[in-house]
Amino acid sequence: MSTKYKKIMIVDDNEFDSYITARLIDNSNLAGEVIEFNSAKLALEFITENQFNTKILPEIILLDIYMPLMDGFEFIEKFRKLSNEANSYCKIYVVSTTINDYYIHKAKIDENIRFTSKPITTDFLSNLD
Amino acid sequence: MRSITAVIIEDEIETIQKLKQFSLENNLIIEVIAFAVNIKESIEVIKEHKPELIFINTTEENLENFNLFLELDFNLPKLVFMSGEVEYAYKAIKLNAVDFLQKPLNVNDFIISIYKTLKMIEMEQVFQNQKIQQINTINSLYQSNDYVAIASIDKIELLKIDDIVYCKAEGKYTEFHLSNGKKILSSKNLGEYKNILESGSLFRIHHSYVINIKHITKITKKDGYYCELINGDKLPIAKRRQDEFLKFIKL
């Protein structure tokens, strides 16, 4: 069965939240593969290694904000410095529980980023473009 | 990862089967303890197992018997209402529902309702812990600092901290000046009262003086800072403590 996306990456240090998102994507038949990373650092390493290879890169990155060691914004900043291939191929969606207006604003003014609050909804998933 | 314990109150076979299937597929996050056909039948099992979540079919009968839930003598489980008629969502909200699932049920809505429940429980827990900690902090501040025991040569006096206007170092001794005008000489030096005197409303303005900021009447700024206290005494604030002092009194 063909899916809308080949690969979606979830970057979330909360195991439960990550699991929920993965389940929702599976149930919606949205992606052929879901890859979960519980740290932004490891996710960035993965993308850096494969930054020229769109066969391996995910089309969608669902990114949490509050994470230890490297938070979502630091991830975005470092990601922007990677190859053009990665930057044009992977779309970032910030998925967060934040109630901090500054963070929400910061995520929303960047036109390359989409923002949604947790829990991610079926509507949000089916409207990804 | 932990799973939420749940009881399901439902009498329609089709919905029961769906819920059985959904919870089986998601047994990492949900553990169904029991099924019951209505609130009346569910009460015993709810009392016995104290589930965290109840899925409840929104029927007139169940709404009428809702008070059975309110009579439970423990923290009411979180509630997710289910119905084919969305009008019931209004009643569900009034009854403090975490979520409302429209029938025919959809697995993703089911998962999201579990997510919401877990987050709600976590938030309540964090909030409560924080509250308890705040209370303990306040209590310990008051308890340990209400009084200070002053040992002089022939007796031990208990002073209310609030009654201390200031303490003055007198060599090996410490002189306590009280709000009723009395002075008490302690046989310990000022440094030995460090722990008690470094909290609450007391502040060391000078190597020789610890004052109670509650008793300051005026702060003057001529040739350095001076504090005037309710008993009329005027004490200097050491230059290197000025910044800290100004910060302290603003609090």
Image (spheres, coloured by chain):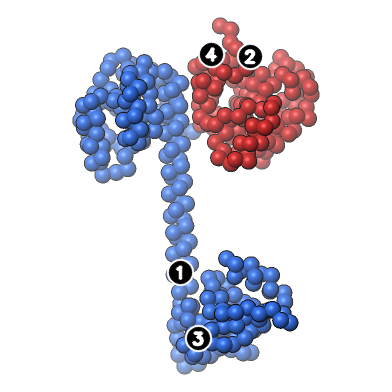
Which chain does the numbered disc 2 sit on? A
Badge 2 vs badge 1, beta-carbon distance below 8 Å: no
In this rendering, is residue B181 above or below A104?
below
Q: Amino acid at mark 4?
A: Asn
Q: Does B178 appear above or below A106?
A: below
Q: Position of residue B228 (x, y in %)?
A: 60, 83
Mark in front: 3 vs 1: 3
Q: Is residue B170 left or right of residue B57?
A: right
For the point 46% across and 42% down, which residue is it? B123
Q: Residues within 10 Å of mark 2 (few under 14, many from 20)?
A: some
Q: Is residue B229 above or below residue A103?
A: below
Residue A113 visible, this orientation: yes
In this view, the residue in front, B13 or A117, is A117
Give the image quarter of residue A105: top right
For disc 2, the marked residue is: A6
The disc labelled 2 sits on which kind of residue?
Answer: Lys
Q: Chain of mark 3?
A: B
- Quick one: label 3, few (<14), some, or many (20+) residues within 10 Å? some
Question: Would you say B50 lies left or right of A71 here?
Answer: left
Q: Secondary structure at mark 1?
A: helix
Q: Secondary structure at mark 2?
A: strand
Chain A: its colour in the image is red
Callouts 1 and 4 in the same chain? no
- Tell me how far mark 2 sits from mark 1, CA to CA: 62 Å
Residue on which disc 3 sits = B178
Amino acid on which the number 3 mark rests in the picture: Leu
Mark drawn on residue B142: 1
Label 3 with label 2: CB-CB less than 8 Å = no
Label 4 belongs to which residue? A29
Colour in which the image shows chain B: blue
Query: What kind of residue is marked 1?
Result: Tyr
